[in-house]
Amino acid sequence: MQPTSSMNEEFLKKWQMGLQIFRPSIDNTSVHERKKAIKLSADVAMASLRKGTTCWSRALIEKTATEDNFLVRQMLSGIKAETLINKKLPKKTVCHRKIVRRSKKILRRKSKSASEEAAAKAKRLVKRRTQGLRNVVPGGELMSNDVLLLQETLDYIVSLQTQVNVMRSIVDAAEAEIER
Amino acid sequence: MSSSRRSRQASSSSRISDDQITDLISKLRQSIPEIRQNRRSNTVSASKVLQETCNYIRNLNKEADDLSDRLTQLLESIDPNSPQAAVIRSLING
């Protein structure tokens, strides 16, 4: 599962539109504000690729809107994604209904064999690692279901790779162009 | 918070869920370069895969942040209507 050429192209188009919208305000601001606008537009472009269908993308748009609501709304309008403006994060933790719900078993207190103890220890370690994922994936804290968390993680990675690939291509090409 | 009645299929749905998690972790293995390049990637534990995934995501975010810094200095060069934009577009599709 890797970013596709069409994903790269679509991200680039949305990102350029975002930069055009930001340009008037960018020209008159500090370096810090400029950098912030560039990163913010890249994040909105990345999140909008999913058209509100994933939890991480809705969480990311909400986060960027918190940082600069006016510019985010302008950009979403510019790339014809106004519907994402009102996409609220679910108050409940369920983002996908198709996921099979997993009932929690009551822990039985009994002595375990060595292999059972090892398996239980591995399970506890995996649980701690999934908590780490919740911290790095936007909206991760809202996903109570481990299956959903992993699905969203995979999708988020592909989208991040798209963002980085395109940004790197532009930066490298622009720097080479300047040195010409 | 009310507790839901235990379903008779609890064990089977739990098994389905575990299978899904195993499958998803396998996909993560293939998505993380540090793991994928390892000849023995099949033997990497689920816990290790998840840890490497966290590191990878943090690294990608850091790289995007660094690229934003570099681009800030080059902002004038990025004109969507310029020949440079056409060069960049061809680079991405090439």
Image: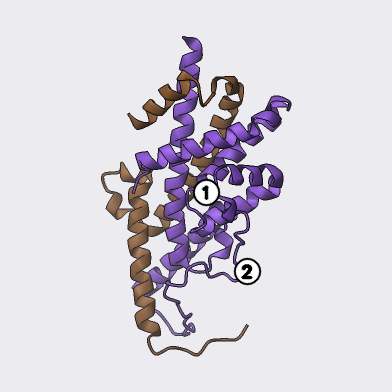
Q: Chain of mark 2?
A: A
Q: Residue at x 60, y 62 (%)?
A: A89
In the rendered structure, which amino acid carries the disc numbered 2?
A: Lys
Q: Residue at x 38, y 43 (%)?
A: A3
Q: Colour of chain A?
A: purple
Q: CA distance from mark 1 to mark 2?
A: 21 Å
A58 lies above or below A177: below
In depth, the one of A115 and A163 nearer the eye is A163
Q: Residue at x 55, y 47 (%)?
A: A80
In the displayed image of the protein, which residue is found farthest to the left? Answer: B39
Which residue bears the numbered disc 2?
A: A91
Q: Secondary structure at mark 2?
A: loop
In depth, the one of A85 and B44 nearer the eye is A85
Q: Is residue B61 visible?
A: yes
In the displayed image of the protein, which residue is found farthest to the top? Answer: A180
Which residue bears the numbered disc 1?
A: A48
Could you say where residue A42 lies in the image, as x and y percent from the top left? 55, 39
Q: Colour of chain B?
A: brown
In depth, the one of A151 and B39 nearer the eye is A151
Could you say where residue A92 lies in the image, as x and y percent from the top left? 59, 71
Q: Secondary structure at mark 1?
A: helix
Could you say where residue A164 lies in the image, as x and y percent from the top left? 47, 36
Q: Chain of mark 1?
A: A
Could you say where residue A94 lies in the image, as x and y percent from the top left? 53, 70
Coloring scheme used: by chain
